[in-house]
Image: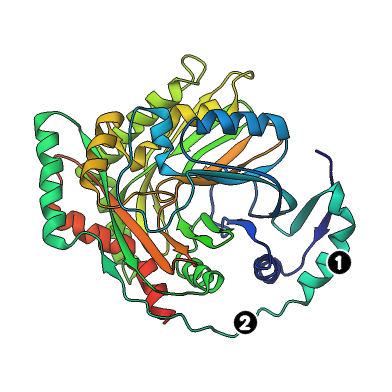
Amino acid sequence: MQRTGKKIQIENISEFKQQLLLWAQQFNIAVWLDSNNYHQKHSTFDAVLAIDAFSHIETNYKNAFEQLKNYQTKVNDYIFGYLGYDLKNDVEKLTSANFDGLHFSDLFFFQPKKIFLIKENTVEIKYITEVENEIETDLKTIFKINNQQTKTNSKNIKIKLRIHKDEYYNKLHSILNHIHRGDIYEANFCQEFYSKNSTINPQEVYQNLNEISKPPFATFLKLNDKFLLSASPERYLKKEGDTVISQPIKGTEKRASSKKEDEKLIKELEQNPKERAENIMIVDLVRNDLSRSAIKGSVKVDELCKVYTFEQVHQLISTVSCKVKKNIHPVDIIKDTFPMGSMTGAPKISALKIIEELEETKRGLYSGAVGYFTPNGNFDFNVIIRSILYNSSKKYISYSVGGAITAQSIPEKEYEECLLKAKAMKQVLLKAK
């Protein structure tokens, strides 16, 4: 695939990003990824917009990774899209029979006609040759966009819980029984908050969520009538050359109103034996997953249980890396590690079966991944958490939160952690009313 492009310098990059996102709303298919200038070592771009499909692949879980592998090889170009959680059923002999109010397909990727890659004040524009003559016209239109949008009224947002508190406690006791019996060491148990017969302005809600969260892996995804509005703080997997890294999050603490209290909470999180145990168990799982694709002896832990601070919470994040052989297909690396350990548990297959049985909702896109492949086989994917999912045709809004359950878990504390993680999504949805 031939692409034509140009690089431009933008003085007010923050304003340009807002204009770009507003301009993207006219297209049926769009992916916007934004790091919010969060300081991190492994960032390639500060923000990316990909719009308008030249070609695409959309499928359920059956043979999905093989289909993606063939598609990625064939187009040999930038492709953007998502991996739904239920691709687990392609990797292992598993099923998903829980309720689904959203109806996202299990896998979707597209080859965009138009791409904008932002790094600091430089914008690199890459259009396929069929539409290269539209670059200048598009830029003129984008620069003219007025960011002061009139607020729209969202309707009928009443947030309900799929699992109520007492039932949540019962389900956690079931997981703890599995742990005490030795079936698993850890399980990531999730619950859904939802609103039926509700409408929102997805772009407006995304911007409000992003503003209060400022996460490093923010995503606005539009796929016709379906939307992902994500304030994810977590990277799933990135490949750069022969290096692959994963950065699982396990361990959460609230933010404080004063700097002194915040520093105290950071120290407590760093030293909290339960939170560290959660994280280390998943690090071991990630190391094992990466070893399937890695050059022998190359898997290493670069950071263990480091506290990263975000607008809403402090998190314990570890970084695990490895080297891979040049002839390994990038899709195989993902398949070997999917679904990510931070959203499943350990041992992974046992945990997957138990959480499927106890959860009430099909996870779908939640706890899957959004990202992109480059023409040379590099890739970068986030973990879809802290996210609002919306099907505008069905008028169904959903957000889910979860927590790692270990032998040391106290159900009441786990429930409080879920509410803390859900706070930002609830705040922007109720504010939208």
Which colour style is shown?
rainbow
Determine contact: label 2, label 1, CB under 8 Å.
Answer: no
Instruction: Give the x, y percent position of residue 259.
Output: 35, 67
Instruction: Give the x, y percent position of residue 177.
Output: 9, 38
| Circle 1 crowding by C-alpha within 10 Å: few under 14, some 14–19, many from 20 | few
**Residue beneath the point at 45% across and 70% down:** 212
Res. 421 image quadrant = bottom left
The residue tagged with tag 1: helix, strand or loop? helix
**Residue under numbered circle 2:** 149
Alpha-carbon span between mark 2 and mark 1: 22 Å
- Mark 2 is on which residue type? Gln
The reply to whether residue 393 is in sight is yes
The reply to whether residue 377 is in sight is no
**Residue under numbered circle 1:** 137
Closest to the observer: 174 or 145? 174
Q: Is residue 246 left or right of residue 28?
A: left
